[in-house]
Image (spheres, grey):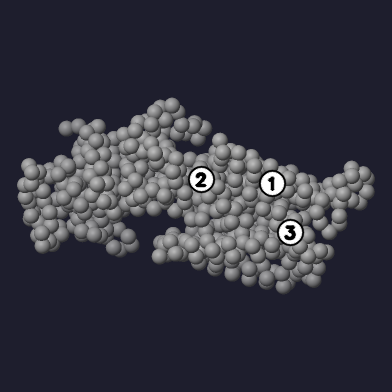
Amino acid sequence: MPEAMIKASNLGFAIGKKIILQGLDFSIQKNDFVFIFGQNGAGKSTLLKILAGIIPARCGEVLVEGKNVAHLSKRELAGKLSFLPQSDDFCLPILVKDVLLSGRYPYQSLFKDFSSRDYEIYKEGVECFALKDLVQRNIQTLSGGERKKVLLATAFIQDVPIILLDEPMNFLDPASSFQMIRMLEGLHRRGKTILLVSHLIEYFFPYANKILALKSGKQHYFGAKVFSPELFKEIYNVSFKHIFLENKEIIYANE
Amino acid sequence: MPMNKKIWGLAILVFSILIVSPFLGIVHIDLPTIFQNNSSSFIFWQLRVPRALLGFIAGAILALSGLVCQNLFKNNLATPDLLGISSGAAAGAVVALKFNLYISFLGMGGLYFFSFLGALSAVVFIFFIAKVIKNSSLYTFLMSGVAINFFYSALIVFFQYTFNYTDTFSLLRWLMGGVSVSGYKEIYFLLALLLIFLGVILFFKKEFLLVSAGEEFAQSRGLDVVHFRIFAFLALSFFVGTVVSICGPIGFVALVVPHVARSWGGSKYTRTVYFTLLLGGGLLVLADILARTLIPPVEIPVGIVTSLFGAPFFLMLLIAQLKKTD
C-alpha cells in the first residue's frame, strides 16, 4: 500500500474541559475525495483546521505525506496542502490578483520575488477559473460565488496535492454551486486529494469515494462511500431516502 | 498610467505646500529676506523650514503606522491612537521625564526608547485582552483601546500633577501635539526612520497583504502569522513611539489618511502606501499652517487642529461601519 496522503492516529482536541474531537483514526490515499459530514458542532471544522495545521491537536498526531504536521513549518505545510476556511470575509480591500498570487507564497523566500513559473501557474489559474475580468477588482466588491471561485483558484495556484475545504458552497445559488462542483471535479481529475466538509449531501455525495461521519466528536464511520440511509439517520436523527434519478444515486433528507 | 499621474500630482501639491509653509506664520517673511543674514532668515531656516519638514515626516510616519495597524488588525478603525498605542507611548515618555531616565541610542536622546516601551505595553495589553476573552472582533479592540487610553491618561495626569509648574506647562504643551523644532537634528533622524519604515512596508508587501486577509487564510498560505505579527508590532511600536516622543500624540492622522488613501489607491497595495505617505505628510503640514495662522498671534497646537477635524470623520466612519455589520 502506498504512503497515505493524510494519516490521523488517535487524534483528539478539547477546549478547556470540553472535548471537541476524540480518538479519530483514518488514513486518506492519493486522489481520494473525502466527504466529511456530521451535525453542527460535531467537530468537522475543527478537524479540518487541525489537519491544516491551523490549530495543534491536543492528542494523537497527523501525518501529511508521512511527515508530522507538528514538526513542519507553516511554509512547508503550505507546500503540501491548501486550506480554504469557511469564512471568507475580507475586512480590508485587496486586489483579486494579490489574493490569487498569495497561493505562490509558500514558494517564496525573503529576497525572492515571484518567478516566471509563479506567474505561469497564476495565468493558468486565471484561465481555468475564468477570472480574467476580476483580477483587477477589489475582492470585497465580488459576489459570494465569485469570491468562492477566487479562493478555489488560489488553492489551484498553490499547486499542492491536498485541498481541504470547509463549506465551500455556503450562500451560493444553484448555478454557482454547480460551477463550483465542476471546478472541484476538475481538480480531482488532476489527481488532487480532496477533503470537504459540508451539509450539502445531495451535491457532494455523488463525487466522493470515501466518507467520514462524525458524531459528537467521535469517528462514527470512515471508509468507502455507502449509500446507507441508516448511517445518515444515525448521524442526523432525520430519515433519509436513497433513490436513483436519471442514473444518479442520490441520498437526501426526508422527514 | 492615470493612477501614477495621480501620485505625481499629489507629490507636486504636497511639495508646493512644503515650499509655501515656511513663509506663513506670525512673523511675516518675504522671499528676498531669507538669503540675508538677519532674524527673518534665522526664523526661516532654523525654525520654519525644519518645522515644515518635521510636519511632513511625522505626518507620513503616523499615517503609515495607521495603515500598518489596520492591516495587522484587519480593520480600518484600528489605528495607534484609537487602540491606545499612542497614549502608551506618551505615558512612557512622561514616566521617563519624571524619573530622569535617559538612554542614548543611535545618537538621539533617550525619550523615544521609553515611548517605544510604552507603546509596546499597550500592544501587549490589547493581545492579552483578546486572548483572555477569546474574541478578536473590532468591538474587543476598540473597547480595550478605550480602557488603555483611560489608564494611560490617568497615569499622565498623575505624573503631571507631581511636576513643578514650568515643567507641567511644557509637558501639557507637548501632550497637545506639535511639530515645532529648531535645527535639523530630529529631522535627519526621523527622515532616516521614515525611509526605513517605508522600506519595511514595501519589502513585506506579501506578508502584510496576507495578514490583512485573515489569520487562517494567511496561515494556510504558509505565513507564520504569530511571528510576523510580533515583528510588525515591534516595528510599529518603535516608529509610533519615536514620533510621539518628539511631536507628542497627534491624533487622527493615522485614521483619516489611510482611509482616503485606500479609496484612491484602488486596493493596490504599493499605490496605497505612497498615497498614505504623501497625504499624511501633506495633511499635517497643512494642519500646522492652519494652527499658526488661524487666530494670530496665538499658535494652536497642531494636535488640537487634527483632532478637531478628525473626530467627526472618525464618527462618520464608525457609523458607516456599524451600519454595515448590522
Quarter holding the N terminus of chain A is top left
Residue that badge 3 annotates: B290
What numbered label is drawn on residue B14? 1
Q: Nearer the viewer, residue A3 or B152?
A: B152
Q: Give whichever of discs 3 and 2 has the lower sequence position.
A: 2
Quarter holding the C terminus of chain A is bottom left
Subunit ID for the residue under disc 3: B
Q: Position of residue B56 (x, y in %)?
A: 70, 49
Question: Same chain for the residues at labels 1 and 3, yes or no?
Answer: yes
The three-letter code of the residue at mark 2 reads: Gly
Q: How far apart, in angstroms, are the residues tagged by discs 3 and 2?
A: 30 Å
**Position above or below: A204 against B245:** above
Query: In this image, A141 relative to B253: left or right?
Result: left
The three-letter code of the residue at mark 3 reads: Leu
**Which residue is depicted at the point 77% across and 46% down?**
B19
**Which residue is depicted at the point 47% across and 49% down?**
A93
Q: Nearer the viewer, residue A203 or A179?
A: A179
Q: Give whichever of discs 1 and 3 has the lower sequence position.
A: 1
The three-letter code of the residue at mark 1 reads: Val
Q: Nearer the viewer, residue A234 or B319?
A: B319
**Position above or below: B70 against B176:** above
What numbered label is drawn on residue B266? 2
